[in-house]
Image (cartoon, rainbow, N blue to C red):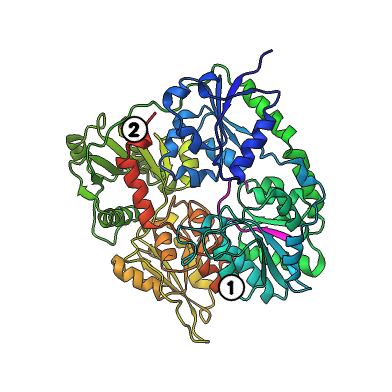
Amino acid sequence: MSVPLVYLCAGDETGWAIDEDRRLTAEALAGVAALVDTPAEADVIHANWWMRLVELPADAIGDKPVVCHMVGEVSRVLAEPMFARALDRVTHWCVPSRSAGDDLSHVAARVSSVPYAIDPLWFEAATEDAEVAAARATLPDDAFVVASVHRDTAGADIASNPVPKLDKGPDAWVEVLAALRERGVPAAALLAGPRRHWMRRALTERGVPWAFVGEQLERDDYPRNTVSPERVRSMLASADAVLCTSRSEGGPRTVLESASAGVLTLSTRVGHAEDLLARDCVVRDPIEMVDRVAAHYARGALAGTIEANLAIAKQSHSVDAAREALRAVYANLGGSSERRVGSVVRRATGSRIGLWNNFQPPPWSGGNQFIVALEAELGRQGYETVRNGPADAHIVNSVQFPREQFDADVDPRVQRVVHRIGGPISVLRGTPESLKQYKVAMRFNSECASATVIQSRHTLRFLAELGWHPVRPTMIRHAADPEVFFAGEPRVRDADEPVRVIATCWSPSPGKGAAVYAWLAAHLDRAKYQLTFVGNLPPGVEGVRVIEPVGSVALGDLLRESDVYITASRNDPCGNALVEALSCGLPAIYYDGGGHPELAGFGGLPFTRPEQVPMLLDRLMDRYDAYRRMIRVESMADVARRYAALALDDRVYMP
């Protein structure tokens, strides 16, 4: 039986992870397919990275099946407007983890599990590397050495103003090593690879010893300090542990490499970490990682996980395992190459953006607050916006807009309409009226939308469960107006002054957590914690300091005058109130539901029962500065740029 002819798209041509994935995919396809040099010769187009796929001309693909690997966390990739083109083109997706499969299945019909493959050399003993040994020798003799080869620095101005590459979590990595030293663990860093400028400065500032394998340059050192696999293996052999503190990953390949090298490996809950590592090696947040590593240093608590992780890597991530998974994918290619979305392109004829919303002066709902903040940022970026009127392209807020006026002014058959879905309203509110609104929104989306903005994985999952597959979904989370909601210096408290805990909410709906606030009012130690509620608290809750709804500027001031934010709302898809609080620098205690975990990230702690809150407040205050430093929120500037791209950039909609 003949094998299909496959054009395997290029990698990113940096010599890093995507190029390695392509090389190993080519090996895994041996016996499954025959590789050809051009798309024209191919029966199947195969890509390890969606960006290379969308660069191909449409006529080079035609109606051929398209296989593509998901690189990166699904929600982060969905945030790229251009990714809509990949969703249009790909007929069969390959995912490296269960979590990626769960997320991608909400927007794609055919999703298969194909593990990252690793070169067999990783299972062999490392060769001695003189430069690694020399760098290791500069660290204290008793050092607990943590190795890292992640790029940690983002931005163009690497020399004078290095900034952290936040998806990789270098800020959290530094927090972990600094906290370990405070706990009596002599942690030290062994670094290699290009663009480690931010990490070196941050470790020095926090008093953590470090050594660098390579040439320390102040200018951009890529590709000069690129590390060979043999050197990485030598570094791992010289280390006591590898700690992955990433916020977002498709892999991470570092976790796979360190597990395959027989090194103690811990990771946050990203990518394939939960599939690959023993349960005790996967943590919810970096502070939990400190506890686990400290316990291991004291009594070898994690020693048994090293062989377990190595066994999983050998069994599940070999080239042979990837080959069998790809064989199954290719066996199911026939007769199923239809595209998910049609290729109609509605043109943006100018640059004026219509914003459709039932505009209200604040204070008002979170959706209204966000649209007003988006309007302000689009103006700062030079776009002309129109409220509820004729324009060149349109951004529409769920069902909260004047529909009759929209129908009179907009022809969605020829004008681009970006439909912002505020969330599964029927799930959040649970009323017949909200179910009706959901049906109206779904019908509008299918009839009028050129693209859809959703705010969270939570929203994506619930929409899929409700049978709604929005047109060209793009995930763009909320952001707050930076001129109003910004972090000041942490409030200085007197030693005997209670911690100021604040909650804010516009809606008095029971789903917003009134029962939790009532419990806290009755049970919190008022000598330690003072609870304030700003907004519309339902009647019957006593013992809480209540401030009536205030405008945005006053609310920002109240947040900055507080220490901790709490939200007990149960199903908020992307709570604007939480975004505003985090933007003001407040670590959060949040109900573990809706979009809250996605927004808070490492900047807070979750609860499911009110009686957990006092203990969590104590834990947060014990490491308050660390949790505050690890807060990360979306930039309104980036959010506005992505909305503008969906509204105005024709490339997003090209076939």
Which is nearer the eye, 585 or 358? 585
- Judged left or right of residue 655, residue 312 is right
Circle 1 residue:
623
Q: Is residue 96 above or below residue 240?
A: above
Location of residue 309 in the rendering, given as x and y in whole percent from the top left corner: 76, 49
> Where is residue 83 shown, x and y percent of the image?
45, 38
Quadrant of the image occupied by residue 146: bottom right
Residue 240 seen in this snapshot: no
Residue 592 marker: none
Numbered disc 1: secondary structure: loop
Q: Is residue 259 above or below residue 394?
A: below
For mark 1, does the 10 Å Cα neighbourhood hold few (<14), some (14 to 19), or many (20 or more) residues? Answer: few
- Mark before the other along the chain sequence, 1 or 2: 2
Q: What residue type is labelled 2?
A: Arg
The magenta stretch is 241-251
What residue lies at 36% left-to-right and 57% top-to-bottom?
507
**How far across and down, in percent of the image, does residue 643 sit?**
34, 46
Q: SS for tag 2?
A: helix
The residue indicated by pointer 2 is 443
Looking at numbered disc 1 in the image, what kind of residue is underneath it?
Arg
Rounded to the nearest whole Å, what is the CA distance between mark 1 and mark 2?
A: 48 Å
Q: In which quarter of the image is the N terminus?
A: top right
